[in-house]
Image (tube, rainbow, N blue to C red):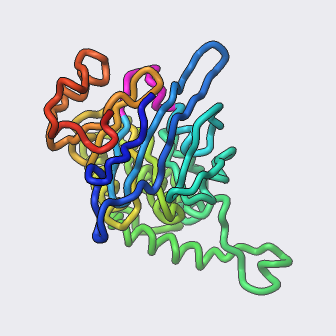
Amino acid sequence: MNQPSTDAAARPTGPTGPAEPILQAVGLVKRYGSVTALAGADLELYPGEILAVIGDNGAGKSSLIKALSGAVVPDAGQILVEGRPVRLPTPIAAREAGIETVHQSLAVSPSLDIATNLFLGRELRRPGVLGSVFRMLDRARMRSEAARHLSELGITTIQNPNQAVETLSGGQRQAVAVARAAAFGNKVVIMDEPTAALGVRESRAVLDLILKVRDSGLPVILISHNMPHVFEVADRVHVQRLGRRIATLAPSGCSMSDAVAVMTGALDPAELPEEALAPGAL
């Protein structure tokens, strides 16, 4: 079973020395009947980084991300947030732990406006008795806060928070979902195939948005099949194979073909040069 890296000298460093993982999975196991989706999976996400998760079909990356986002409960293993063990039985529990997820399906309501989508399930109430007794929504504050969040992420293609999501392009809808995650995720943002089904220009805008989320202080887990996108934005690449982490690669020290070869089992990570391996590699 892969074990989290314990070599302090190998860990990413911060202003005060080696950084500790903000999110960590240790020995996660998940079985569906006779099928083992996770066979002792490990993962470490450090502050201020984009960690890409790649893997072939059936590698267990979806189950790993579902466990981290509260969509499934692992049969064994541990999840830690800032070094403290947490239990994430539901996506709401994951949100309460500071983990926000942008799913490939986006989970936006097309008929509602942008501001309402940003605050869906977390609506702001009017102050005083109007909010506490009559449960009236503070729509003006939600519009103002939505405009602020979009502005902070540099999303300039959306000018009106009152605009219905169904009138937006695919890239703009993705931007709304990312803005919602960045607005409420105070520790980690997980993005599942954010550029899938997008054109070149819209994919470029979403990649820039991912970098801005990272630069705002939120570490990002990026799940993607698009190797050029992975190698463009990721600080480290977690390779999942046969239900566990097989390697963690440094994009600056290896090629996309190396990553694909490791992912498919055609190349043993031990054959790679030292500079191709990142902390948590083996």
Q: Is residue 60 magenta?
A: yes
**Which residue is pictured at 55% across the width and 62% down the height?**
118
Report whether 78 appears left or right of 19.
right
Q: Residue furthest top?
A: 34
Residue 261's place in the image compared with 163, above or below, is above
Q: Quadrant of the N terminus?
A: top left
**Which residue is pictured at 36% across the width and 43% down the height?**
5
Which residue is at the front of the view, 105 or 251?
251
- Residues drawn in magenta: 54-62
Is residue 148 visible from the viewing direction of this image? yes
Which residue is at the front of the view, 53 or 139?
53
Q: Count all numbered tags in the image, as a single digit.
A: 0
Report whether 233 appears left or right of 147.
left
Which residue is at the front of the view, 66 or 225?
66
Which residue is at the front of the view, 69 or 82?
82
**Which residue is pictured at 37% across the width and 47% down the height?**
6
Give residue 281's quadrant in the image.
top left
Give residue 260's quadrant in the image.
top left
Residue 155's place in the image compared with 27, above or below, is below
Q: Is residue 110 magenta?
A: no
Q: Residue furthest right?
A: 133
Q: Residue furthest bottom?
A: 128
Is residue 206 visible from the viewing direction of this image? no
Q: Position of residue 173 (x, y in %)?
A: 45, 51
Q: Position of residue 264 (x, y in %)?
A: 31, 18
**Which residue is pictured at 51% across the width and 29% down the height?**
40
Residue 179's place in the image compared with 232, above or below, is below
Q: Quadrant of the C terminus?
A: top left
Q: Position of residue 41 (x, y in %)?
A: 48, 32
